[in-house]
Image (cartoon, coloured by chain):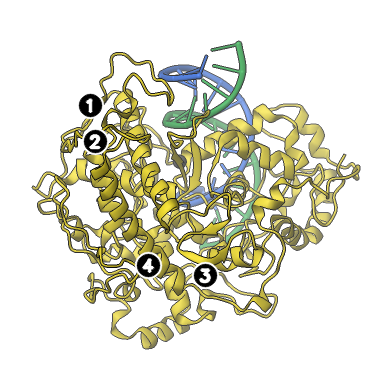
Chain colours: A yellow, B green, C blue
DNA sequence: TCATGTTTAAGGCCAG
DNA sequence: CTGGCCTTAAACATGA
């Protein structure tokens, strides 16, 4: 059995919360998304502790996936049938790991005034600019050749404003150092007649991609894709009619030539390609803004996905026993759950804040884990004794307060709007801690990409309402709440849940979370990005696109309906991804390791991978 | 029946 | 003491 070593926790319970473990697994995967079973596997492979009592922790893990908004479910690509869906991280959740460690969530940091002033000066007036601001300068994406990226607004239906928002330029001011909590400042949904351009969600983002993609998907693109035939997944629902789904969204069927594998006509494909080009240029530009470090500073350790596969060197022999917890764990108990496992438990918030890692050059999970372990070891030892000796204290995992869970991101964040994501301090490796350390632009860029707005559909959304005693805090300002459940559902006043803030009057619902295209990092999996942004747009349109500016009445659909929509979106996203893969700009080719938009960049080269991944991935 | 998801409850800790 | 977080337990639902 594995024994604890610098690199591993052996049988001891690792100091990571389920959220951390899951994020690690997801983020270290090649596509930044994994099916449930693979998440399990990752955890078990890396942490022997979890090879036991699987039912127990897996149940918890599943709970976390569903419950926390930072985890998003992305349906499988039609061309890759399989068991469940893929799970990925909400783009905004990435910032939680900025400090390079999954150990604990950074504590809430308030932007020190000093920094604030600095920002003011540096960014000038634009800093707090609440309004959408300039963004005017359009920078036609270079990459898109003649075929201009500004596609003809051809798309049917969407009353989407066709103006392409500038890729990067104008955005900096606004969200540069602002966390998502600020982004809403620009205003509230004033959707006019479907003027998505004005929707806060797209305030600073380049919606061209999502717009087209979503338009395509919403229009019922791959229309007959899943109907009876189609090998893909069968789908025996005789009753379901493939075409019945577009709820009100225009059915832009292009009947024409036989659908290709993805069920699209040539025209459809052209449109998708167009969208793809836009997406590509967006990504390229985003990528350029990333801080590029000299190779010399990079570590050549293999990329995560490689490591993951490797055997686990560090698991070896037995441990020091101890584990009082182990024993306890075995005995299931309900309440006083096992003992703490330690590790976690022993960190104080302070320590948590200290995690560092910044852009560590160690682009490997093993290294990360080792680092984290080091940081907590000492402490644990001591505490462990205490624990053993008598008290138990921690529960389950104890104290990890990590919380990356963006559950309903609300309250916490705001509080004052001043918090931003930075870590407090400390740096090891001499690096300056916060994002401020990097060049302004970098930081700005990164931050922007990560944070941007979440769509906060007005505070009236589901959850907030029922504030009950406790939850009342939902803030007045900072409407940055991501609707827990999809926008289709109405906020019926149900009142259930109390203390856990677990409300949900939506009934069984497909957790659709708003995701702004602008939040999708260049390194974000293309397919997932396409799907999420399209889905978000689609729901948004369904909810607000009535021209009145007011939300549409809730629509409750049979879950089958939702399922069909998912399939459509998945197909559209897959088509875009496929196009991107072949045309350039999008996903990394699994086979060649090349990133289409970056010819010279071969992702199989760890340094390249690191480079391209950008600092947000520094952790992993 | 098993795997995958969703949710509601409830107990423990910790910072404030 | 309390609100926010993290775990666990469990009831349920759905599809393979
Ligand atoms: Mg979720």
Question: Which corner quadrant of the image does residue A491 belong to?
Answer: top left
Q: On the image, numbered disc 3 is attached to which residue?
A: A422
x and y percentages locating residue B8 in the rendered image: 43, 29
Among the two numbered marks 2 and 1 on one chain, the one whose residue lies closer to the N terminus: 2
Q: Position of residue A532 (x, y in %)?
A: 37, 46
Q: Nearer the viewer, mark 3 or mark 1?
A: 1
Element type at mark 4 = loop
Residue nearest the viewer, comparing A236 with A120: A236
Find numbered disc 2 in the image and state the secondary structure of the residue it sits on: loop
Q: Which residue is mark 4?
A: A417
Is residue A362 something one can see in this rendering?
A: yes
Q: Residues within 10 Å of mark 4 (few under 14, many from 20)?
A: some
User: Counting residues from the N terminus, which is met first, the one under dot 4 or under dot 1?
Assistant: 1
**Closer to us: A556 or A449:** A449
Real-space Cα distance between discs 3 and 1? 48 Å
Disc 4 sits on a residue from what chain? A
Residue behind mark 1: A243
Instruction: Report whether A521 appears left or right of A607.
Output: left
Q: Are marks 2 and 4 in contact (CB under 8 Å)?
A: no
C-alpha separation, residue under disc 3 versus residue under disc 2:
42 Å
Q: Is residue A291 above or below residue A537?
A: below
Q: Nearer the viewer, residue A605 or A2?
A: A605
Q: Is mark 3 within 8 Å of ligand 1?
A: no
């Amino acid at each position: 059995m594995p024994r604890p070593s610098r690199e591993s926790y052996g049988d001891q319970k690792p100091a990571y919360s389920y959220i951390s473990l899951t994020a690690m697994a997801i983020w270290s995967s090649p596509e930044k998304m994994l099916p449930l079973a693979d998440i399990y596997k990752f955890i078990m492979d890396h942490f022997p502790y979890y090879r036991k009592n699987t039912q127990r922790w897996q149940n918890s893990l599943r709970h976390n996936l569903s419950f926390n908004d930072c985890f998003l479910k992305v349906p499988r690509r039609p061309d890759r049938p399989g068991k469940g869906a893929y799970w990925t991280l909400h783009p905004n959740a990435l910032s939680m790991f900025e400090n390079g460690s999954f150990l604990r969530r950074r504590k809430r940091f308030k932007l020190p005034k000093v920094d604030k002033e600095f920002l003011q000066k540096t960014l000038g007036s634009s800093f707090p600019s609440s309004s959408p601001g300039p963004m005017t300068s359009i920078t036609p994406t270079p990459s898109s050749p003649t075929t201009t990226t500004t596609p003809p607004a051809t798309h049917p239906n969407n009353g989407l404003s066709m103006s392409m928002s500038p890729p990067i330029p104008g955005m900096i001011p606004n969200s540069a150092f602002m966390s998502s909590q600020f982004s809403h400042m620009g205003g509230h949904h004033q959707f006019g007649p479907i003027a998505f351009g004005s929707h806060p969600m797209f305030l600073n983002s380049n919606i061209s991609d999502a717009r087209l993609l979503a338009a395509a998907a919403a229009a019922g693109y791959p229309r007959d894709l899943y109907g009876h035939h189609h090998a893909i997944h069968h789908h025996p629902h005789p009753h379901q009619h493939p075409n019945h789904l577009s709820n009100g969204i225009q059915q832009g069927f292009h009947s024409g030539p036989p659908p290709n594998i993805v069920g699209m006509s040539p025209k459809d494909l052209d449109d998708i390609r167009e969208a793809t080009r836009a997406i590509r240029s967006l990504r390229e530009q985003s990528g350029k803004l990333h801080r590029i470090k000299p190779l010399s500073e990079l570590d050549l350790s293999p990329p995560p996905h490689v490591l993951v596969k490797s055997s686990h060197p560090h698991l070896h022999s037995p441990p020091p026993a101890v584990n009082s917890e182990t024993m306890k764990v075995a005995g299931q108990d309900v309440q006083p759950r096992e003992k703490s496992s330690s590790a976690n438990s022993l960190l104080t918030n302070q320590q948590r804040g200290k995690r560092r890692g910044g852009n560590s050059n160690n682009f490997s999970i093993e290294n990360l884990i080792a680092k984290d372990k080091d940081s907590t070891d000492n402490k644990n030892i001591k505490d462990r004794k205490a624990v053993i000796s008598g008290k138990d204290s921690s529960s389950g995992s104890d104290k990890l307060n990590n919380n990356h869970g963006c559950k309903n991101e609300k309250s916490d964040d705001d509080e004052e709007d001043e918090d931003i994501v930075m870590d407090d301090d400390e740096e090891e490796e001499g690096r300056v801690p916060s994002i401020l350390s990097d060049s302004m632009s970098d930081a700005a860029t990164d931050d922007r990409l990560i944070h941007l707005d979440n769509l906060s559909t007005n505070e009236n959304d589901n959850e907030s309402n029922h504030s009950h005693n406790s939850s009342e805090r939902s803030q007045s300002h900072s409407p940055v709440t991501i609707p827990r459940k999809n926008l289709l559902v109405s906020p019926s006043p149900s009142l259930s849940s109390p203390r856990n803030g677990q409300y949900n009057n939506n009934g069984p619902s497909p957790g659709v979370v708003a995701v702004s295209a602008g939040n999708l990092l260049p390194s974000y999996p293309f397919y997932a990005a396409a799907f999420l942004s399209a889905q978000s747009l689609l729901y948004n349109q369904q909810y607000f696109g009535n021209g009145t500016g007011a939300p549409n009445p809730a629509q409750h659909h049979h879950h089958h309906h939702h399922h069909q929509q998912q399939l459509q979106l998945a197909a559209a996203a897959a088509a875009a991804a496929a196009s991107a893969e072949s045309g350039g700009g999008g996903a990394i080719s699994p086979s060649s390791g090349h990133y289409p938009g970056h010819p010279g960049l071969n992702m199989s080269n760890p340094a390249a991978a690191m480079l391209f991944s950008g600092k947000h991935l520094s952790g992993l």
